[in-house]
Image (cartoon, rainbow, N blue to C red):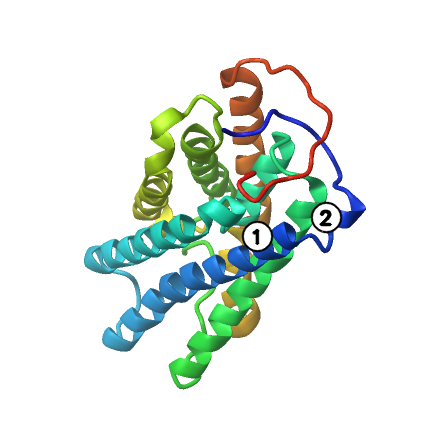
């Protein structure tokens, strides 16, 4: 069962605790898996189709690649790290008191490194094709892209809370990876043509760094963090029943 809500920086011995190291490694590998397949699907379509723009069929393929890889990434790391695979998800869990600040910092570093390594591997495997980076489409203002990211990430984080964090989720936790993958894929079908539908700062950062494309990049940090933070606070304090505070305990590997 999910531990009682508690806010804590984290203990000193947590820095080198085996559980922390294993969870951090799991986040690194799972984020690498997700970004490699998600960004790789874009490069593959660029290789197949030389025309500019994205057709409806290509959009569906991109959404499926992200959904499939995210399902695998979350399912393979959920029992070790909670399967965040996203700095915004970690931030939402942090605001909800479901993870210590120290563990969140470890996760953020691992997620960003995983995205960068995945992008480097793609550049190597594709004979130096530059990874695409997220940016708002022509005719769409940055404000619109920001709102898109906030709303889509809110929906994703709300789903994370309902299926993976809520202490009363029961057997619903079994489908958490599938439910989260579905909402991400659905949001890509909605927001993809407008701003790319990132919902994940690591997913945006890796390709931007390796590809050297930073246009509108701030949107893909600010939007997801606001959306995930709002969803975490709303679900934690308005949906989950009030819990009796407990003193801080060592974070177990199954803690979200």
In the image as oriented, which residue stretches furthest toward the front? 18
Quarter of the image where one finds residue 128: bottom left
Q: Is residue 152 left or right of residue 11?
A: left
- Mark 2 neighbour density, 10 Å: few (under 14) some (14–19) many (20 or more): some
Q: What's the residue at 74%, 41% (across, down)? A: 10
Q: Is residue 64 left or right of residue 21?
A: left
Q: Can the viewer see residue 134 in this picture?
A: no
Q: Is residue 255 left or right of residue 153?
A: right
**For residue 14, which numbered disc appears in the image?**
2
Judging by the rendered image, the residue that carries numbered circle 1 is 23
In the image as oriented, which residue stretches furthest toward the bottom? 127
Task: Kindly state the secondary structure of the residue where label 1 is placed.
Answer: helix
At which x and y percent is residue 140?
Answer: 43, 49
Task: Kindly state the secondary structure of the residue where label 2 is placed.
Answer: helix
At which x and y percent is residue 206?
Answer: 53, 65
Q: Is residue 80 above or below residue 53?
A: above
Q: CA distance from mark 1 to mark 2?
A: 12 Å
């Amino acid at each position: 069962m999910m531990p009682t809500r508690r806010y804590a920086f984290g203990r000193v011995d947590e820095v080198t605790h085996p559980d922390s190291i294993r969870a951090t490694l799991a986040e690194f590998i799972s984020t690498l898996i997700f970004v490699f397949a998600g960004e790789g699907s874009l490069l593959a379509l660029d290789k197949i189709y030389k025309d500019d723009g994205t057709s409806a069929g290509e959009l569906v393929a991109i959404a499926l690649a992200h959904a499939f890889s995210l399902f695998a990434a979350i399912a393979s790391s959920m029992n070790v790290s909670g399967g965040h695979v996203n700095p915004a998800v970690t931030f939402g869990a942090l605001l909800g008191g479901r993870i210590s600040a120290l563990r969140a910092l470890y996760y953020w570093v691992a997620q960003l490194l995983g995205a960068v390594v995945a992008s480097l591997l793609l550049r190597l495997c594709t004979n130096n094709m530059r990874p695409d980076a997220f940016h708002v489409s022509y005719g769409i203002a940055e404000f619109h892209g920001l709102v898109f990211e906030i709303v889509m990430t809110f929906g994703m984080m709300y789903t994370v809370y309902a299926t993976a964090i809520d202490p009363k989720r029961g057997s619903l936790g079994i489908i958490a990876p599938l439910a989260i993958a579905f909402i991400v894929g659905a949001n890509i079908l909605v927001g993809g043509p407008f701003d790319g539908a990132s919902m994940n700062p690591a997913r945006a950062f890796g390709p931007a760094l390796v590809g050297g494309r930073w246009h509108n990049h701030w949107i893909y940090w600010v939007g997801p963090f606001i959306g995930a933070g709002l969803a975490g606070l709303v679900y934690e304090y308005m949906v989950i029943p009030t819990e009796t505070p407990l003193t801080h305990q060592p974070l177990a590997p199954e803690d979200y």
